[in-house]
Image (cartoon, grey):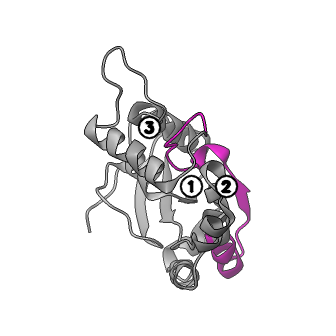
Amino acid sequence: MAVFYLVRHGEADYDHMLEKGFWGFGRDFAPLSPKGRQQAETAARDGRLKSAEIIVSSPYTRALQTAQIISTETGIRVEVEVDLHEWEPDQDNLYTTSEESFAFAREFTEWKGEYPPGVKFRWETLTSMRQRMRGVADRYSDYSKVILVGHGMAFRCLTYIEKMHPGEIVECTYRKGQPECEYSFT
């Protein structure tokens, strides 16, 4: 059984990405905003993180920067976990505007994260995201304490929490093969 410290990345700054016309995976390059760096620095000083054995980060820039800030504060090494990425609004990576991405998110919400019978949308299903997140949790469940740095929507699939704020830490326990992390509502 492992204790996971789920750390949502700090607030991102998408302005430069929008100016460059980066859509799809290009938006994943967005760095932390100044406020996001502050949020990551605050999280990094949380005493619970100091006893972790490893930091596992999403490959997205905003998560990697958050993980690096935590690593600098704690001295704990960072590993990149590709499957710790955020929800995929367009698995074909063909969308070209934020509005299109938001439309996919509205579809996801309307259909409660699952395709209706006989229909396939371009977005990643809730079931797929949960399986991906459980795979990540399983790979690191043999550690005693793990810091996972990633994304609110992905973490919600692992914990069923309603919302995570940028820089927030949710502590939970996980056993390999269990459906979700167990956490307290304190």
Identify residue for label 2.
26
Graded by Cα atoms within 10 Å as few (under 14), some (14 to 19) or many (20 or more), the crowding at tag 2 reads some
32 left or right, relative to 80: left
C-alpha span from label 2 to label 1: 35 Å
Q: As shown in the figure, which amino acid type bears the numbered disc 2?
A: Gly
Q: As shown in the figure, which amino acid type bears the numbered disc 3?
A: Arg
- Name the quadrant containing residue 121: top left
User: Residue 38, percent across and down?
Assistant: 54, 85
C-alpha span from label 3 to label 1: 22 Å
User: Residue 70, percent across and down?
Assistant: 63, 75
Of the numbered discs 3 and 2, the one sitting upstream in the chain is 2
Q: As shown in the figure, which amino acid type bears the numbered disc 1?
A: Ser
Residue range in magenta is 66-93
Identify residue for label 3.
130
Of the numbered discs 2 and 1, the one sitting upstream in the chain is 2
Q: Quadrant of the C terminus?
A: bottom left
172 left or right, relative to 109: right
Q: Nearer the viewer, mark 2 or mark 1?
A: 2
Using the image as rendered, state which of residue 16 and residue 164 is in the foreground.
16
- Name the quadrant containing residue 64: bottom right
Q: Nearer the viewer, mark 3 or mark 1?
A: 3
Graded by Cα atoms within 10 Å as few (under 14), some (14 to 19) or many (20 or more), the crowding at tag 3 reads some
Using the image as rendered, state which of residue 156 and residue 111 is in the foreground.
111
Q: Is residue 67 visible?
A: no
Identify residue for label 1.
144
